[in-house]
Amino acid sequence: MGDENPIHILGDYSKPSYEGYRNTIELPVGNNVVPLRSDTIRLVPNGCSFHGLRSEDPNQYLKDFLKLVDSLDLDGENKERTRLCLFQFSLRYQASNWLERLPAGSISTWEDLTTRFLT
């Protein structure tokens, strides 16, 4: 017989809440998930970044991104997960804003991501 409308104090309304927050990219869950090292994450924007400018070719960017990420010594099981995880770190400015505007959890595979990115 719980109270349906608990009394809140003013401080309750000023606390930040991350409840319900989800990333746009849902990473596949696997048994052999290897955490990414910080130097690996830093490598991506330094070696390959996309800003969303009209002068940039998204197809060429994807080729360069795959060349960089697939050169990392990872087993095939985690390759798609690694691509999905590192992709968000390679986007800058308009491209990063584009990704953030997509619905939460709307991308779960590399194919989903590339299809949305190229259209």
Image (cartoon, helix red, strand yellow):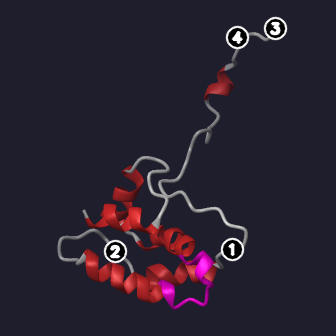
Please state if 95 lies on the left or on the right of 2 as rendered.
left
Task: Work out which quarter of the rendered image holds the N terminus and state it.
Answer: top right
| Three-letter amino acid code of the residue under disc 3 | Met
Highlighted range, magenta: 69-79
Q: Residue 4, which numbered label?
A: 4
Quadrant the C terminus occupies? bottom left
Say which of 118 and 7 sits in front.
118
- Residue situated furthest left in the rendering: 54
N-term mark: 1 or 3: 3
Tell me which corner region of the image, top left, top right, bottom left or bottom right, holds residue 35: bottom right
Q: Residue at x 18, y 76 (%)?
A: 55
Give me the residue at 43% from left, 74% from top.
Answer: 90
Q: Nearer the viewer, mark 3 or mark 2?
A: 3
Q: Which mark is residue 35?
A: 1
Label 2 close to label 1 by CB (< 8 Å): no
Which residue is the site of mark 3?
1
Q: Secondary structure at mark 2?
A: loop
The mark that comes first in sequence, 2 or 4, is: 4
- What is the three-letter code of the residue carrying label 4? Glu
